[in-house]
Amino acid sequence: MTDMQETQTADEHLETTSVDGAPAPDAEHLTKPPSLAIVATRISGTWVGIIIGSLVLALLLVFVLQNTGSVKVSFFTASGKIPLGVALLFAAIGGVLLAAVAASLRILQIRRRMKSDERHGANASLPVGTNLETS
């Protein structure tokens, strides 16, 4: 048995003390290795997005392939027959594009408001729509 013993304290440092209780002179450099924590990064978020996107695309492909019955579609003066799955896919894409346009316009509106507030010296940290009047 050696005349040194190792104990672990609550703050995760490894202390080396002699048997009589006095700390060893080189105890500062002995620390427990850091725990291996999983940290989310932008790259990991990108991979998660790619995987989820791939799964959604696979489900859409199955949907289109299972709905191959032809339907007549008319848009203004144009008309024709296309598979039902493709028609519904076009409708979904149109809905997503419409939502993206609405969201982009809202973002532009908020940016203009923030720039206007900064130029006029208003408190730019207040959320848009905050009522400054007290009742």
Image (cartoon, grey):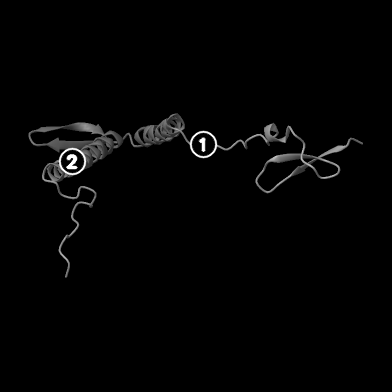
Describe residue 51's horizontal placement relative to residue 30 as left or right: left
Q: Quadrant of residue 58?
A: top left
Q: Look at the numbered disc 1 and give the secondary structure of its residue.
A: loop
Residue labelled with disc 2: 111
Instruction: In this rendered view, identify the residue nearer to me: 59 or 83.
Output: 59
Mark 2 Cα within 10 Å, few/some/many (few <14, many 20+)? few
Residue 39's tag is 1
Residue drawn at (70%, 33%) of the image: 30
Estimate the spatial distance between the alpha carbons at disc 1 and disc 2, rounded to whole Å.
32 Å
Describe residue 89's horizontal placement relative to residue 46 as left or right: left
Which percent across, then down, holds residue 67?
34, 37
Instruction: In this rendered view, identify the residue nearer to me: 101 or 44.
Output: 44
The amino acid on which the numbered mark 2 sits, given as a three-letter code, is: Arg
Image mark count: 2
Instruction: In this rendered view, identify the residue nearer to me: 84 or 20.
Output: 20
Q: Quadrant of residue 70?
A: top left
Instruction: In this rendered view, identify the residue nearer to me: 100 or 88.
Output: 100
Residue 61's tag is none
Describe residue 117's horizontal placement relative to residue 22 as left or right: left
Marks 1,2: beta carbons within 8 A: no
Q: In which quarter of the image is residue 108?
A: top left
Among the two numbered marks 1 and 2 on one chain, the one whose residue lies closer to the N terminus? 1
Which percent across, then down, holds residue 52?
43, 35
Mark 1 Cα within 10 Å, few/some/many (few <14, many 20+)? few
Which percent across, then down, holds residue 134?
17, 67
Quadrant of the drawing holding the N terminus: top right
Q: Look at the numbered disc 2 and give the secondary structure of its residue.
A: helix
The amino acid on which the numbered mark 1 sits, given as a three-letter code, is: Val
Residue drawn at (88%, 37%) of the image: 3
